Image (cartoon, rainbow, N blue to C red):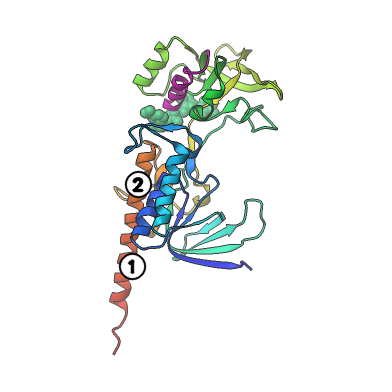
Amino acid sequence: MPEKIIGRKVVILGSGPAGLTAAIYASRAQLEPLVVDGPQPGGQLTITTDVENYPGFADGIMGPALMTEFRTQAERFGTEFSNLWISEVDLSARPFTLHGKESPESDEVSAIIKAETLIISTGASAKWLGIPGEAPVPEGFGGNGVSACATCDGFFFRDVPIIVVGGGDTAMEEALFLTRFASKVTVVHRRDEFRASKIMQDRVLEHDKIEVLWNTEVREILGTKDKGVESARLFNNVTNEESDHATRGVFVAIGHKPNTELFRGQLDMDEVGYLITEGRTMRTNIPGVFACGDAQDSYYRQAVTAAGTGCMAAIDAERFLAEQEHEAAATTPAAV
Ligand code: NDP
């Protein structure tokens, strides 16, 4: 039997800019929200360095410091935090039921959370190629030459050649950023044209430190434990030729996947898994469940837009609860 039952008017899953902004608004509305941190407390900004485009910080701010500010502000108004691992959600009836474990490996449910409203801000994670050599150390070179975050790891690749995989705006942005450090950046793309916006493509194609290998796939990342990555095995899908390309780093920039598997079969999502919300609101297909941030937005994916949708989700939740109370009062017979 689970040890604890936690009941809340508002439960927020995820603690990036969307979740913490929702928490600030919900706690200022005296709804005493509970934020379930998730596997990466603070979200994706905690693995970036300088954030120069978050309004209000004229000189920029470090990603982790920005998220500490968000958290402190949410705590100031009474937000509570939980580091439970949510293994299952049941959205078939209100209050919604969430099963919380101490860790992903744990067999036992240690707490049941009952939520009158649920705000989903579980964010997105970088996609990987799924090739040999890509997995995290010790199985592969992840963290030792393989990365999905140029701003986090670019600094470690001074004056050495590196590869960026992908043809979208993220790949362009990563490649351009990495020219600050690397001796040469090779963009490896599986087709003969980029998906990225024209302006970003032009910047990449015109940059004298960047070379593009078209119609090329990375099949394997090779190296040694001591030296890290030394080369990438490339496959040209037009000539069918395989070759080894010397490189010290491989940056995978092939898009993101929303962290929404937990809700599959219950909430409407698009083919990639982004949660679908109604019109200008953050309402999902289940009344009382709201979605915001990168779990819901595949298009803008910015800290400030995530924060904006977090605010909207909290206001939607607050109004939903007020309507429920109003309806309950209207159907309750007056005392005689
Ligand atoms: P995208 O989905 O736009 O691009 C992903 C790229 O990776 C595509 O070129 C795709 O190839 C390639 N790819 C996907 N899977 C594989 C695979 N298994 N092997 C090899 N290549 C693969 O994702 P992004 O993250 O680039 O962008 C997402 C959204 O965010 C876009 O709307 C983008 O405009 C926006 N964005 C905007 C920025 C800006 O304006 N500054 C910065 C970053 C993102 P293929 O083309 O063949 O499908």
Q: Quadrant of the C terminus?
A: bottom left
Mark toward the viewer: 1 or 2: 2
What element does badge 2 sit on?
helix
Q: Residue at x 39, y 39 (%)?
A: 303
Q: Where is residue 306, by image quadrant?
A: top left
Does residue 35 appear in this view? yes
Q: Residue at x 61, y 18 (%)?
A: 248
Q: Is residue 229 above or below residue 336?
A: above
> Dot 2 corresponds to which residue?
309
> Dot 1 corresponds to which residue?
324
Give the residues drawn in magenta, as a range.
167-183
Q: Does the magenta portion include 178? A: yes
> Which residue is at the front of the view, 167 or 163?
163
Q: Is residue 67 above or below residue 222?
A: below
What element does badge 1 sit on?
helix
> As shown in the figure, which amino acid type bears the numbered disc 1?
Gln
State the image coordinates of residue 138 (x, y, percent, origin top left): 70, 32
